[in-house]
Image: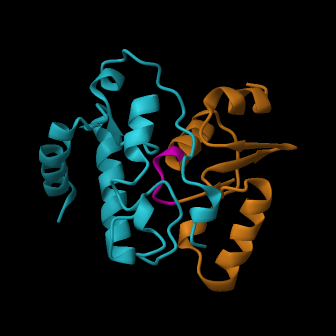
Chain colours: A orange, B cyan
Amino acid sequence: MYTLSTCSHCKATKKFLRDCEIRYDFVDVDLLEGAKREAIIEEVKKLNERCSFPTIIIGERVIVGFKEDEIRKALGL
Amino acid sequence: MDRKQLYEMLKKTQEPKGYYFNRNKERVLELLDALITNKERYGYMSCPCRLGAGDREKDKDIICPCEYRAADVKEYGSCYCNLYVSQEWNEGKILHEYVPERRPPGKAGF
């Protein structure tokens, strides 16, 4: 998932996944610089035009925001 | 300025306008720390829940309190970050829905 280090919803999502013992990969986009940052922003925009956070990918699904019910459903929890 | 000073200062200025801190104080303090981080990083308190461009002019609509707070608190009882909320939201009189991003996609300066 794509996150911001400062974002409360991103922190809540990470905590939720940890509590559910779900392994996840994340990148804090606000901490990136230069070409890497630009490349990642383009990746996020392809998934979510608004480039808002967290943008979460679970299998084929893209969930924007900490929507616990949708995340649970996508994970089969 | 530390988180406690910021908390007191904002509480004093925002509550009379009808914008209350989320009753979850831990969450509020975490967000105030994030605002302080952004102040150090960009020179202004850019919204912690949005990606800033690092340019005050481009980010002016998302400097906290952002331009979207009034409409979000009116419609959802809470700002995008859940930092500022209405009294009704804090009292649980309205559903705590996820507040969708109101900032138009073209506004993001990156």
Q: Which residues are magenta?
A: A5-9
| Figure check: A25 above or below B21 | below
Residue sitting at the far bottom: A34
The stretch drawn in magenta includes residue B91: no
Residue placed at 46% from the left, 30% from the top?
B76
Residue placed at 20% from the left, 40% from the top?
B17
Q: Position of residue A7 (x, y in %)?
A: 48, 53
| Figure check: B101 above or below B99 | below
Q: In front: B108, or A9?
A: B108
| Figure check: B16 above or below B101 | above
Residue sitting at the far top: B93
In the rendered structure, the answer to whether residue B47 lies left or right of residue B25 reads: right
Q: Quadrant of the N terminus of chain B?
A: bottom left
Residue A48 visible in this rendered orientation of the protein:
yes
**Residue A19: which quarter of the image?**
top right
Residue placed at 69% from the left, 40% from the top?
A22
**Residue B81: which quarter of the image?**
top left
**What secondary structure prevails in the magenta region?**
loop
Residue placed at 31% from the left, 44% from the top?
B28
In the rendered structure, the answer to whether residue B60 lies left or right of residue A42 reads: left
